[in-house]
Image (tube, helix red, strand yellow):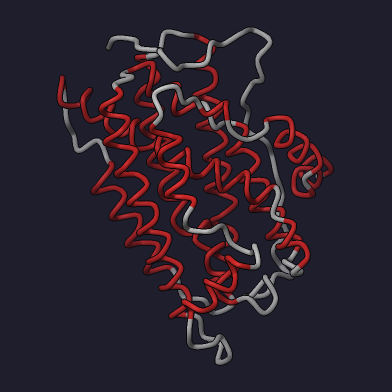
Amino acid sequence: MTRSTPTQRPYRTEAHAINARDVQFDFSGVPMHYVPGEVLVTHAVNVMHLVLPEAERAMSTALAEALPHIDDERLAEEVRGFVGQEAMHASSHEHAREHLQSLGLDVDGFVGKIGWLVDRMLGDHGLTGRAKTAWLKERLGLYAGLEHFTAVIGDWLLNADSLVDRGMHPAMLDLVRWHGAEEVEHRDVVFDAFMYVDGSYARRVRTGLLASAILLLVLIISATHLYRVDPAPDKGRCWLWQLIRATRSGLLPNVTLFGTELPRYLSRGFHPSQMGSTDQAVRYLAQSPAARAAQCA
């Protein structure tokens, strides 16, 4: 593979290192609707417990496949740290999903279908030689586009005081903010790996467009499915009105962010370091209740 780094951040020995952190969440007291009075908001957040673990598992596999092609030792270190963080994300969200399942939110079948779809779409397909290399580049491009939006959402979660004001359960709030903070912290890694092993601007545009469309579609389908299978008799009938009200009140990001963030990502001079705040993310990670609980365990 040839290295192409027109917009890759230069790594320095004093640069912030990416490492997996031990966390310990206690979901025992979390109700099914952990954002009080906001059924759709709860299920929009729940998508993180369903879709993201499957996508992150596949993403970690692709990054691990890319490691032998990365000679930059610091970037390779970042990739290994990223894979460790994503494994912890998947595990923590799986525990949250199991808790919600125990409360009567039947999601196992849907999660199984998501996992099957991710494997069929983004697995290595047993390819070899040039075809394997080309498919790896394509997957890295897709994941770089996906990570842009997860970092944007992570930054939003770190600053979403409306969720605190609405009384979101502290354990779930900590879970999504911890995850969001690490998304901001490692926002550069997949993009830099893609730029290292390929860096094609045409591929970045194509995969960025595809990743944003797929993510938006999956978010909508997943949230509406969860809303539909929610057994609560008082969940309300019009999910669309709940969505509009939630975005207006700041309880959910506005879907227009896909329209504003995509041109930013597709700019030739774009680099993920231009967005979010590593300092804010690391400060939250240092005081996260789940991280502190793990230290005391």
As rendered, which of 291 and 166 lies closer to the eye? Answer: 166
Name the quadrant of the C terminus.
top right
Q: Quadrant of residue 89?
A: top right
Q: Position of residue 84 (x, y in %)?
A: 55, 33
- What residue do we see at 77% from left, 45% from top? 288
Residue 23, percent from left and from top: 70, 44
Residue at figure coordinates x 32%, y 62% from the top left = 113
Using the rendered view, name the quadrant where residue 279 is placed: top right
Is the N terminus in the top left, top right, bottom left or bottom right quadrant? top left
Between 213 and 257, the residue placed more toward the observer is: 257
Where residue 182 sits, quadrant-wise, is top right
- Is 278 or 209 nearer to us in this picture? 209
Q: Compared to 102, does 51 lie above or below? A: above
Closest to the observer, 85 or 194:
194
**Which residue corresponds to the image point at 73% horizontal and 33% vertical from the top-left?**
282
Task: Tell me where residue 147 appears, x and y as whole percent.
Answer: 47, 38
Above or below residue 217? Residue 118 is above
Q: Is residue 138 left or right of residue 266?
A: left
In the rendered image, the residue lying farthest to the right is: 296
Say left or right for 295 vs 87: right
Q: Position of residue 119 (x, y in %)?
A: 29, 47
